[in-house]
Image: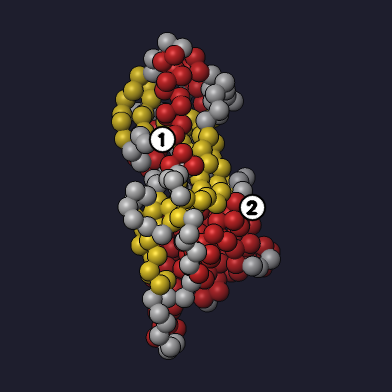
Amino acid sequence: MDIRQLNYFVAVYEQGSVSAAARQCCVAQPSLSAALRQLELELGVSLFIRLPKGVTPTEDGDKLYGHAGKLLSQLQSLKASFKAPVNRVQFRLGLIKALGVERMSALLREFSQQVAGLELHLVEPDEPCDARIITPQQLKAGEVLQPIWHDRYLLALPPAWPLSLQSHIQLTDFANLPLIKRMPCDAWALLYPELLRRDINPDIRADIQTIEYALGLVSAGVGCALVPDFDSLQQRSDVSLRPIQGLTLQRNLVLAHGRTQDSPALQVLRQLCQQAANKG
């Protein structure tokens, strides 16, 4: 086992995809796959379950991720202790909820690696900050934006429900449908008024804020919920994701900052957001 293998493993774990991890690590996919197989052979375990769309970690993969993160962090600290001290660069980044753990982790890791001495503070988007990741509707006067991601929303259902056998969900299917309300949520703000306009009344079973709790309730069979179409959710076997026909549910995510702000750290973050937008 070596540091290169651990770095590859962490990239695959966080990206949920071997090909995406290979692009992030700037290495050929066959080389990364070979290093990953060698690591599994050395440990005598399977670290990932290969799926049609990416990979999902096994229990051993989750266990190794915790250890690998600590080891790589300690290694970075060790290297840093022999380097000349650098000036600390404080940067406050405001984030709205439900941005996607995997892609945000990758973005923030690249940001931290490319800005020497970065001291990153993640805050609520309405607090004073150097930049914000928000929807365009939340843009303030005097701010400019850089597009990052475009998400469509799907309906997450328990796999055993008859509706999960349909390729699409009709608006009429929401009549008396057990539904988990999640706020704030751009898609809910569009869907619910439309249902009421059509005199369609779902059966609201819960009112929560986070995607994680919503998915937990869906998996438990309590109800269904609107969720962004994240790659990591497509790989889950405990929920079924279906598009809703007859209504466009989507959101755009952007990097926003003051028109006159132009620090070196912000320039790096804008470039990374541009790269993320190009990949999308």
Q: Residue at x 40, y 38 (%)?
A: 215
| Dot 2: element | helix
Amino acid type shown at disc 1: Cys
Seen as rendered, the residue at the extreme top is 199
Is 189 on the left-hand or right-hand side of 145? left
- The answer to which of marks 2 and 1 sits earlier in the sequence is 1
Q: Which residue is mark 2?
A: 278
Measured as percent of width and height from the top left, residue 165 is found at 55, 24
Amino acid type shown at disc 2: Asn
| Dot 1: element | loop
Q: Nearer the viewer, residue 207 or 167?
A: 207
Please tell me the numbered disc located at residue 223: none
Q: Nearer the viewer, residue 235 or 76?
A: 76
In space, the residues marked 2 and 1 are separated at their CA atoms by 25 Å
Measured as percent of width and height from the top left, residue 178 is found at 38, 22
Q: Which residue is mark 1?
A: 185
Relative to residue 126, is residue 151 depicted above or below? above
Measured as percent of width and height from the top left, residue 213 is found at 34, 40
Is 273 on the left-hand or right-hand side of 123? right
Q: Residue at x 40, y 85 (%)?
A: 85
Residue 233: tell me if it is visible: no
Q: Report crowding for label 2: few under 14, some 14 to 19, many 20 or more residues within 10 A (C-alpha).
A: few
- Which quarter of the picture shows residue 131? bottom left
Q: Residue at x 54, y 59 (%)?
A: 270
